[in-house]
């Protein structure tokens, strides 16, 4: 079986220079993976609650599924971290400066490793010998993809279930398959607050339909909607990162706007979003 360190050309004498970062979110295990998909993993990794990177290099492995991790790159630690506070997020910790090292960068997001981490530590030394299980130095490659993982192309209206960060990246990068699909249908969509479970039903029937409407949401989280604007004013602008977006119904472009508005009203009634959600009318 092919070991990760063999592919990365890290020899036994270099192990003392590395810490492994098993990147996983505290309350949301997939958060670092989503950050990776939208190109923000490096910045996410540089914010640490403690001084976790006490060696010159970080070997980053990002949680993908149970016992399955994706290679996120090797990073050089540039000096000592600085204390940082983020009052809006009620968070304080340490800010590192790092740079991506040119070691098999073509395999970032392509190598998947199988590793059952039977210890709690998320920042082990590369040469660590755990009491049970396999040492990080002996991690085995599970698969190597032909292409780097990325935000999926649009696969169907009934499959849309994305968070705010993903929506922001789709709009920012103008992903063709998403723009083509969402620009050519009128429809009714749902915005769900992951923290409270409250829902908002909206409709789109402008020139570029759902794409145009969701572009407005990607800009500021509320898209000019008064109910969502009030919520973000109360909870703070970053609260928009708790929103998820899906599509309830798509309609032919030839159907009149009044029909779409009627379907929006129907879904508000079905989901009771006026009584228990975020719709006020």
Image: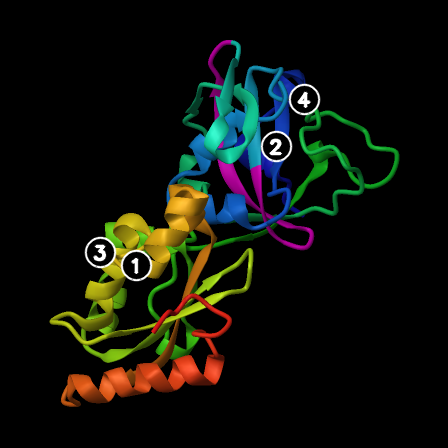
Residue 78, label in figure? none
Q: Position of residue 167 (x, y in %)?
A: 34, 56
Tell me the mark number nearer the camera, choosing from 3 and 4: 3
Q: Residue furthest left?
A: 207
Which badge, 2 or 4, is on the more N-terminal residue?
Answer: 4
Count the numbered circles shown: 4
Q: Position of residue 112 (x, y in %)?
A: 56, 49
Residue 12, label in figure? 4
Query: Distance between the Cα atoms at labels 1 and 4?
Result: 60 Å
The residue nearer to you, when weighing 127 against 91, is: 91
Query: Distance between the Cα atoms at labels 3 and 1?
Result: 26 Å
Query: Distance between the Cα atoms at labels 3 and 4?
Result: 45 Å
Which badge, 1 or 4, is on the more N-terminal residue?
Answer: 4
Give the residue at mark 3.
174
Image quadrant occupied by the C terminus: bottom left
Which badge, 3 or 2, is on the more N-terminal residue?
Answer: 2
Which badge, 2 or 1, is on the more N-terminal residue?
Answer: 2
42 relative to 16 in the view: left or right: left
Give the residue at mark 2.
21
Label 3: state its secondary structure.
loop
Q: Residue at x 40, y 40 (%)?
A: 106
Give the residue at mark 1.
226
Q: Residue furthest top?
A: 79
Q: Please provide the residue range marked out in magenta.
A: 61-79
Q: Residue at x 52, y 43 (%)?
A: 32
Q: Is residue 188 magenta?
A: no
Q: Position of residue 207 (x, y in %)?
A: 11, 71
**Number of residues whose C-alpha sits closer than 10 Å to that of mark 1, classed few (under 14), some (14–19) or many (20 or more):** few
């Amino acid at each position: 079986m092919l070991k990760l360190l063999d592919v990365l050309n890290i020899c036994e004498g270099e192990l003392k220079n590395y810490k492994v970062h098993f990147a996983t979110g505290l309350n949301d295990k997939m958060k670092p993976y989503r950050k990776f998909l939208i190109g923000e993993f490096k910045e996410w990794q540089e914010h640490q609650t403690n001084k976790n990177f006490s060696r010159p290099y970080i070997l980053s492995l990002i949680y993908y599924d149970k016992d399955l991790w994706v290679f996120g790159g090797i990073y050089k630690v540039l000096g000592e971290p600085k204390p940082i506070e983020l009052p809006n997020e009620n968070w304080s910790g340490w800010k590192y400066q790092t740079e991506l090292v040119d070691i098999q960068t073509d395999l970032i997001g392509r190598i998947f490793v199988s590793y059952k981490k039977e210890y709690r530590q998320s920042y082990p030394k590369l040469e660590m010998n755990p009491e049970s299980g396999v040492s990080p130095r002996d991690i085995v490659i599970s698969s190597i993809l032909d292409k780097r993982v990325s935000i999926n192309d649009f696969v169907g209206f009934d499959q849309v279930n994305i968070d705010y960060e993903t929506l922001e990246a789709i709009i920012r990068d103008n992903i063709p398959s998403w723009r083509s699909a969402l620009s050519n249908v009128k429809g009714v969509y749902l915005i769900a607050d992951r923290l409270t479970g409250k829902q908002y039903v909206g409709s789109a029937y402008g020139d570029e339909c759902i794409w145009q409407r969701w572009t407005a949401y990607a800009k500021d989280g509320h898209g000019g909607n008064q109910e969502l604007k009030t919520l973000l004013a109360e909870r703070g602008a970053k609260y928009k990162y708790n929103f998820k977006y899906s599509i309830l119904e798509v309609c032919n472009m030839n159907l009149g706007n009044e029909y779409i508005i009627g379907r929006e009203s129907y879904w508000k009634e079905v989901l009771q979003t006026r009584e228990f959600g975020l719709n006020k009318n």
